[in-house]
Amino acid sequence: MEYTQLGRTGLTVSRLVLGTMNFGPQTDESDSHTIMDAALGAGINLFDTANVYGWGENKGHTETIIGNWFAKGGDRRDKVVLATKVYANMAAGDPAWPNHDKLSALNIRRAVDASLKRLQTDHIDLYQFHHVDRSTPFEEIWQAVDTLVQQGKILYVGSSNFPGYKIAQANEIAGRRGGTIGLVSEQCLYNLAERRAEMEVVPAAQEYGLGVIPWSPLHGGLLGGVLKKEAKVGRRSSGRAADALADPAVRAQIQAYEDLLDKHGLEPGETALAWLLTRPGVTGPIVGPRTAGQLESALRAVELKLGEELLASLDEIFPGPGPSPEAFAW
């Protein structure tokens, strides 16, 4: 495994991030524990989750699965850089009940304590805002964060799904207040097929010293060899990948991608992950395996080195928008 620093911090993290969103809904607790053991054994130390994972009536269940894994001991908790998120409504019963969602000081305090209990730990290493809260000023958010840092309940703070201007606003206000180092990471949608983050989110993250943690690196399976799998099983894909492939232009683009990698003897999913590891500012993509076999495939991406010619060919197939303002102006 390769390691890097998380943004401008001194925190050392693996170049692959273990995503746990499937733990519970698609992968049972026993298999989830097996995957986490395998990830740790392979050197992955940054584990990402969210308080809402498990979804619906089972929201919070994923954190509980992770907490039960920590409780097995064996230095599991000490070896893991634990990241979770806050924003979604976690109220039992009526989801409209106030003050159980978003980023008010009250909800942040409540959500941290609930996550700590489910995770069976005394602190969260990276506490991430899952979405922008347009109703809560950052002065209030940072005041709540300062208190939690002083209490030892959280160490670092990151954002997720923030536009570039909100990254700037958050850290400018943090700098004026003092006391907190502000956001140290941004978790965003970023992959070969979805490169809009390159316009402003990634540059803002680099300017303010945030590590970029891409989610959905295979774009819902679209970059994971979906057409090759269709040909092998003799039937069309389902879900988000099928919806995207219904567009002839997208289907032709993915076919060109898979044909290119066939010529180089490369696997599409591993290449998509390896490509992200070449991108400026990227700490590491989130991989969300449902099985141990999927984790093994993702691990091979770290050792995969993409040549300049191949990178140029990938840019031709997936050109990206380019930087702002040139992406939309002169």
Image: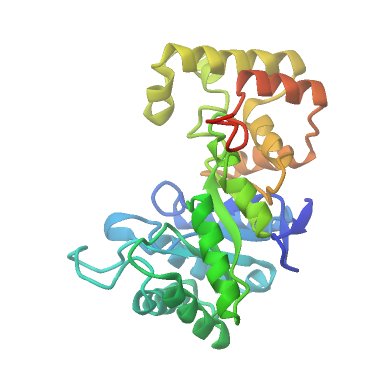
Q: Quadrant of residue 14?
A: bottom right
How many labels sit on residues?
0
Q: Quadrant of residue 185?
A: bottom right
| Above-or-below relation of 48 to 219 | below
User: How far from the left and from the top, in percent, is residue 57?
Assistant: 27, 59
Residue 134 visible somewhere in the drawing: yes
The residue positioned 50% from the left and 69% from the top of the image is 68
Q: Quadrant of residue 198?
A: top right
Q: Nearer the viewer, residue 221 or 191?
A: 191
| Above-or-below relation of 193 to 97 | above
Q: Nearer the viewer, residue 182 or 56?
A: 182
User: How far from the left and from the top, in percent, is residue 176?
Assistant: 57, 76
The residue positioned 56% from the left and 73% from the top of the image is 174
Q: Residue furthest front?
A: 330
The residue positioned 42% from the left and 77% from the top of the image is 140
User: How far from the left and from the top, in percent, is residue 172?
Assistant: 57, 67
| Above-or-below relation of 93 to 276 | below
User: How far from the left and from the top, in percent, is residue 289?
Assistant: 55, 44
Residue 155 visible somewhere in the drawing: no
Q: Is residue 115 left or right of residue 35?
A: left
Colour mode of the rendering? rainbow
The residue positioned 57% from the left and 23% from the top of the image is 225
Q: Is residue 181 left or right of residue 329?
A: right
Q: Nearer the viewer, residue 42 or 213?
A: 213
Q: Residue furthest bottom?
A: 151
Location of the C terminus by quadrant is top right
